[in-house]
Amino acid sequence: MLNIGKYEFNSRLLLGTGKFTDLHIQSQAVEASGTEILTFAVRRLNLEEAGEKHFLDTLDLSKYTLLPNTAGATTADEAVRIAELARASGLCDMIKVEVIGDGVTLLPDPLETYKACSILLEKGFTVLPYISDDVILAKRLQLLGVHAVMPGASPIGAGRGIINPYNLEMIIEQAVVPVIVDAGLRSPKDAAHAMELGADAVLLNTAVSGSSDPVSMAKAMRLGVEAGRLAYTAGMIPVKRYAAASSPVEGMVHT
């Protein structure tokens, strides 16, 4: 089971709901992914406009836990206001804290992220901060009391896969809460790689919604996550400098 705060999940794939071409394809992709957690930007979802359809209208929400995020925030205060809006709407008390510090790289602002998390924890939220692959920040946020950390594999939407596996390994090795690799993944290979490193889960959006066939890609990503997790728990052989015969030479008959 994947445990985040008071929540328990079977699936280790979290799926974003943005950028899909239409709600029908989105619904099919969500189903194919096997996800139990759906994330979305509160500021992009009009919860008050009558007649405007969005994914909340097309999915059986009893099957999913919603993870609102604070995308669009550039300060801690903005992130806190967005989180409070989401909770006031009755969506969920779990929040992905996303505070962007640079408009070109879309990398998160570590200082404002930390500040936002501190405030939201005091307010009783289940807090999941999106961060860069900063080992020390991940450690300090866990000491603060966050319920998971979400380091990016590479910049949002870049599709570059895991740029710095060493840092992710260090974050995972020192973690006392779930580590969810978020942002920059492109293929099932990337998802499997993250899970093989020991990540507890991955969060995807563009890799699925931006593909030519989002439904098939969602299924492929689900299988990648499952395969990577199984490989990690099975225990992979160590990497060696030289070849090692798969058939032992002891006991062979010499001719």
Image: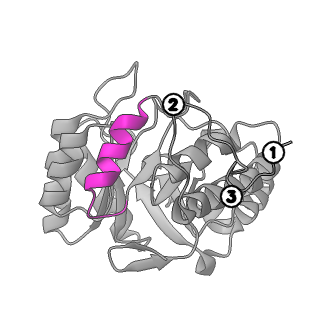
Q: Nearer the viewer, residue 70 or 167?
A: 167
Q: CA distance from mark 1 to mark 2?
A: 28 Å
Residue 174: in magenta span = yes
Q: Which residues are magenta?
A: 164-178
How many residues crowd around disc 1 within 10 Å: few (fewer than 14), some, or many (20 or more)? Answer: few
Residue 230: in magenta span = no
Check the image and report above or below for 169 versus 223. Answer: above
Which element type, helix, strand or loop, lies under badge 3?
Answer: helix
Q: Residue furthest top?
A: 104
Please, what is the dominant secondary structure of the magenta stretch?
helix
Disc 3 or 2, which lies upstream in sequence?
3
Amino acid on which the number 2 mark rests in the picture: Arg
Q: Which residue is mark 1?
A: 254
Determine the residue positioned at 24% across, 41% down: 135
Q: CA distance from mark 1 to mark 3?
A: 49 Å
Determine the residue positioned at 40% across, 43% down: 71
Q: Nearer the viewer, mark 1 or mark 2?
A: 1
User: Horizontal placement of 80 versus 62: left or right?
Assistant: left
Q: Is disc 1 in contact with disc 2, using a CB cutoff of under 8 Å?
A: no
Residue 226 position, x and y percent, is 64, 61
Q: Which residue is mark 3?
A: 222
Q: Which residue is mark 2?
A: 241
Q: Nearer the viewer, residue 116 or 34?
A: 34
Check the image and report above or below for 108 versus 60. Answer: above
Asked if residue 239 can be seen in this view, the reply is: yes
